[in-house]
Amino acid sequence: MKTRIFALKLWPLLGNLWVLATLVFNLAAQPASAAPATIVGGILTSDTTWTQGGTYQIDTYIDVPAGVTLTIEAGVTVENYSGNGSDRYNFDVEGTLIANGTAEQPIHFNPGLTGWSGINITGELGAINTGSNLNYVIVEGGGYGGSGVAAALRVQYADVDVHHCQFNNSPGDGILGDDASGQGNANIYDSSFTGNQGYAVNFQDGSVNPTLSNLTASGNGASLTVDGDVVVINDNTLHGAHVWENMGLPYLINGTIVGHDGVLVIEPGVQVLAYDGNDALDVQGSLIANGALGQPIHFDPVDPALGWAGIAILGEDATHLSTGSLLNYVVITKGGFYGGCDLYVSYGEVTVTNSQLDGGQQSGVCLEHGADLVMTDTLLTNNQIYAMDVRDAGANFALDNLTAIGNLSNTIGIDIGTMMGDHTWSKSGINIYDLYGYVTIAPTGTLTVEPGVTVLFGVGDDITVRGVLTATGAISEPILFTAETATPGLWSGINFWGTPEQHAIGQLAYATIEYGGYGGSALVSLENADVTFEHCTLRYGASDAIRIYPGALSDQRPEALVNSTLLTFWSQFTDLSGYAIDNRASDVTAQAAYNWWGSPTGPTADGNPGGTGSALNGAVLYQPYLTGPNSMSIFLPLVIR
């Protein structure tokens, strides 16, 4: 019975212990009372620290003047004071802001009821504000005023380091380098930009040189007509060395210029976007866009339907060239707004390799006066005129292993111009050169046309050789000089016009010249020239095939100079409306043996009464001649002694 009575009394005791334990647990689970917020505001008069984990409510505004440092420790929350303060607050730093949170205890900047100014870090012209940094900081809603005016972090005449930060839901930009000449720069690492009305990052002074790494952005640009998840480099001139890193976001340019003393390096994998219209990347100095296989560099318009102006390599003149530019594994699309090209070169040199130039509003490449281009292993596709347009025939270019697909003309256009120095029209994969102007080879110039090349001529166009033309094809790869349409007399011809002191020189082999003779000119004209034809064909001319003019007399030694020399053998002259050779120079004998004149009876000429082939005029040594177009049989006149 005692045992039973004891058990009955034990249960109330156990119940009391359970209630006590529950009470102790509930008390332990209750959060500690939050520390009261600290109300701050006005101008700081000395270095100040906002201590770890505290809450600081700003009454109307806070101003950190020059010479003063505000240090914000990890876990601090900065927000609006809703008591007697404004419904939004300003946060201005002319001195130094050190905001060092941690991954576990970031620093929070929160908005007021209707927002706040964001963090404004400013200096003065000639006195850049340096030394501020934000590390593990989350900035919410700062920057009333809109994109280009305000931001979660606004920087002017200042240089700020930003690491491991978040910039969210600003009415303006995430970070703004304010003013087109404001030198606002932020070096940003491992940071994100979400839901800002403007751009993720907007450097209005494009001459600044930020260091950017591992950035992410989403949902920015609600107030813009373009995607805001970008880093804007606004119109300005870059001086010195600049690098556009592969930092995770595209760069958006607006009329950016690389100055004559500037070098812009673009890392593999970067995308550069351009506003539609006449916004170009103008390079007066050097552009090194060195992509990689699998990580090409892309230059694209914001709106593919409108395009952009493209890349322009632009020196000032022959003594102030743009030099040293390289495009390797680069894709340029939709350049040439207002009638330009994906790549435009004037008074500049550039090397292009392993790249693609696509959809230019005129041509893939345009070369003007003073241009020097080396291009290999590159695609030129879907351009609206030429694959490549040499707008000054004197421009220099070396081409190899090119492919042209889908262009209006998969050719290289050549306009009027004078060639000085050595030039080559190569068999590069784009093997057709389309002349739409008058080309002159200067006395100091040479042009070599490689085997397998075709040269097309427009109406009335010609080549005038005052220096040297070498067009030496091969039996398996002949060279063709022809008209854009198969019409006799459509183009003029090739004119070798030298001086008594310096003859024009021509060496042609395995080449066909046809459909020339515009305005009564000859397929080939000679005056003070020395020209050789071997295994060539001259046909379908509207006038003479070869015409030799009396040479001009030298003012110095007229009696010692020969006007012209012509040597042609193993060649063919057919379907001509004029003479095969019209020699109007009385002191020159054209050497023209071993040729096919269109008939086994030989040419129509004095001394060949039975000849029915193409006609000769003047002193032409035509015997022996071929008796068939592809024959080695020759006719030898019987000599009776």
Image (cartoon, rainbow, N blue to C red):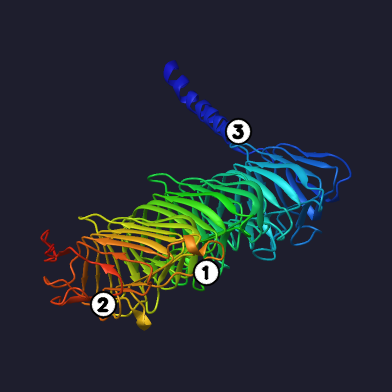
Look at mark 1 in the image and give the residue it sits on: 276
Discs 3/2, front: 2
User: What amino acid is at disc 3?
Assistant: Ala
**Helix, strand, or loop for circle 2?**
loop
Residue 357: x and y in percent read: 41, 59
Q: Nearer the viewer, residue 486 or 616?
A: 616
Identify the secondary structure beneath mark 1: loop
Q: Residues within 10 Å of mark 2 (few under 14, many from 20)?
A: few
Residue 310 seen in this snapshot? yes
Residue 241 is left or right of residue 530, and the answer is right
Question: Who is closer to the viewer here, 364 or 118?
Answer: 364
The kind of residue on which mark 1 rests is Asp
Residue at which label 2 appears? 486
The numbered dot on residue 28 is 3
Q: CB of mark 3 within 8 Å of CB of mark 2?
A: no
Which of marks 1 and 2 precedes in the sequence? 1
Say which label, 1 or 3, has the lower sequence index: 3
**Upstream in sequence: badge 3 or badge 2:** 3
Q: Place residue 432 in its image quadrant.
A: bottom left
In the rendered view, does 521 fall on the left or right side of 500? left
Q: Amino acid at mark 2?
A: Ala
Percent x, y for residue 583? Answer: 33, 73
Quadrant housing residue 168 = bottom right
Tag nearer the camera, 1 or 3: 1
Percent across and percent down for residue 405 are 31, 63
CA distance separating discs 2 and 1: 41 Å
Where the N terminus falls, by quadrant? Answer: top left
Q: Quadrant of the C terminus?
A: bottom left
Q: Residue at x 55, y 56 (%)?
A: 348
**On the rendered structure, is 109 left or right of 219?**
right
- In the image, 330 versus 172, the foreground residue is 330
Q: Residue at x 82, y 40 (%)?
A: 48
